[in-house]
Amino acid sequence: MTMTSVAIAYFSGYGHTARFAEAVRDGAASVSGTAVHLVAVDTVTDEQWQLLDAADAIVFGSPTYLGDVAARFKLFMEQSSGRWKNQLWADKLAAGFVNSGAKSGDKLHALQTLSLYAAQHSMLWVSLGLLPGWNSSQASEFDLNRLGVWLGAAAQSNGDEGPEAAHPSDLATAEHLGRRVAEQAARTAPAAVPASVPALV
């Protein structure tokens, strides 16, 4: 079996977004043959930059502050400029998740920032792949994708509650995204050539 690698590069100001990063990790890890790495971008090390360079897919995550990704995440984006110049992440899969206190919070704009960032690195964006939930009289706030977003996973966290109060639907939606990315990575990873079969030249 060919192992694939998924890295989750995220910033979390108060711990809420970290909960969703962990849910993305759990979803990706549920796919057989997937190695998953959490990378907190505000403390990223040289070794973790190498993990990102070697990954088959990178999932980007940030809280939404003033309608866009956090400044600490933007710093990480700028720090990757050398990788952009050399297109080290070209053709890797990419996806994103965001979190804010408001139901909307202009999270779509933050996801657009992440998808444009991935496009500049020549990465291939993986959407959420879910129909909207909680949009009929028979629906529930516990439906997957309760906030009705397509570009990535969106979460809402009450500002007066800690990370332990993360909404179950948002955690499950983040887990779905991680699983979807890992499944896509497994489909697109180059097949390993069995040792008994000579390579064609």
Image (cartoon, grey):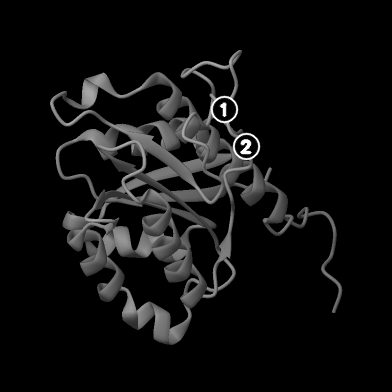
Judge by depth and name the residue closer to the eye, 57 or 140.
140
Q: How crowded is mark 2: few (under 14 residues within 10 Å), some or many (20 or more)?
A: some
Residue drawn at (56%, 36%) of the image: 179
Which quarter of the rendered picture does the N terminus lie within? Answer: top right
Residue 148's place in the image compared with 7, above or below, is above
The residue at which mark 2 appears reads as 130
- What kind of residue is marked 1? Gly
The residue at which mark 1 appears reads as 133
Q: In the rendered structure, are the residues bearing label 1 and label 2 in contact, judged by CB atoms less than 8 Å apart? A: yes
The residue furthest top is: 138
Question: What secondary structure is marked by label 1?
Answer: loop
Residue drawn at (18%, 56%) of the image: 42
- Give residue 25's position: percent from left, percent from top: 42, 36
The residue furthest front is: 137
- What kind of residue is marked 2? Leu
The residue furthest bottom is: 85
Residue 89's place in the image compared with 24, above or below, is below
- Give residue 170's position: percent from left, percent from top: 42, 29
Judge by depth and name the residue closer to the eye, 23 or 116.
116
